[in-house]
Image: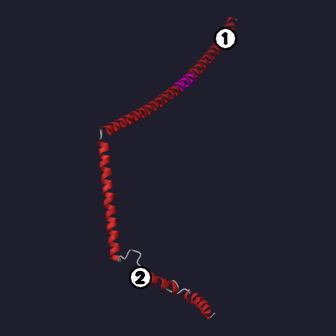
């Protein structure tokens, strides 16, 4: 019984006492565990400089492999691009693209030409309508002037006839007076 009691006391005492956080982080038990694990190196027993050297070698090896792959891909690409089949396909695509662009430009020019023709037709129609309106106004003015001249001539003729009649009437009155 005494043994189980001491165990239980030691556990509760260790648990309460050792698990209190301290400034430096962690508990007393955790620190002792870290200390024990320091002895076992997870890097396979390599020192920090050896580990850094190994990392540098791995990076250099990776760069060499990437450079080799890049050179191989560039060489393969150059061989493929240099082949007659690929050059023929490129030329065919260029011809197709040129033809497509030519058709597009031709269509655009046709649209612009039609638009310009339509605008010129519209302007000509507007000019024709303005000229017709001007001619109509001139004809109406000419007709009004002719009508006014005709009325003025009729009025003059009427006044002349009245004047002539009045003159003849006076002459007849004077002549009748002088005949007496």
Helix, strand, or loop for circle 1? helix
Q: Secondary structure at mark 2?
A: helix
Q: Quadrant of the C terminus?
A: top right
Q: How far separated are the C-alphas under marks 1 and 2?
A: 157 Å
Q: Residue furthest front?
A: 1
Which label's residue is closer to the chain start, 1 or 2? 2
From the top left corner, tell me how far across and down residue 90 is, in percent: 35, 38
Comparing 176 with 71, the one in front is: 71
Magenta span: 128-137
Residue at the spot 30% in from the left edge and 46% down from the top edge: 78
* Front-most of residues 64 and 175: 64
Q: Position of residue 177 (x, y in %)?
A: 69, 8
Q: Which residue is mark 1?
A: 165
Mark 2 and mark 1 in contact (Cβ < 8 Å)? no
Please name the predominant secondary structure of the magenta segment in the image: helix
Residue 66 in percent (x, y) is at: 33, 58
Q: Which x, y percent locates residue 94?
A: 36, 37
Residue nearer the viewer, 107 or 28: 28
For disc 2, the neighbor class at 10 Å (few under 14, some 14 to 19, many from 20) is: few
Q: Nearer the viewer, mark 1 or mark 2?
A: 2
Q: How many marks can you see?
A: 2
Q: Which residue is mark 2?
A: 39
Vertical placement of residue 158 versus 105, above or below? above
- Residue 133 is covered by the magenta coloring: yes
The label on residue 136 is none
């Amino acid at each position: 019984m005494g043994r189980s009691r001491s165990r239980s006391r030691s556990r509760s005492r260790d648990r309460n006492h050792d698990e209190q956080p301290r400034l430096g982080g962690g508990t007393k038990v955790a620190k002792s565990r870290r200390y024990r694990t320091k002895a076992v190196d997870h890097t396979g027993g390599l020192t920090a400089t050896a580990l850094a050297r190994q990392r540098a070698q791995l990076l250099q090896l990776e760069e060499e492999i990437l450079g080799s792959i890049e050179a191989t891909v560039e060489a393969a690409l150059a061989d493929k691009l240099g082949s007659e089949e690929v050059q023929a396909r490129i030329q065919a695509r260029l011809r197709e693209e040129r033809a497509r662009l030519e058709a597009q430009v031709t269509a655009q020019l046709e649209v612009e030409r039609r638009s310009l023709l339509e605008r010129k037709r519209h302007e000509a129609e507007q000019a024709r309508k303005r000229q017709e309106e001007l001619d109509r106004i001139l004809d109406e003015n000419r007709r009004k002037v002719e009508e006014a001249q005709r009325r003025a001539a009729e009025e003059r003729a009427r006044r002349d006839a009245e004047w002539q009649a009045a003159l003849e009437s006076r002459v007849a009155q004077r002549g009748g007076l002088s005949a007496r």
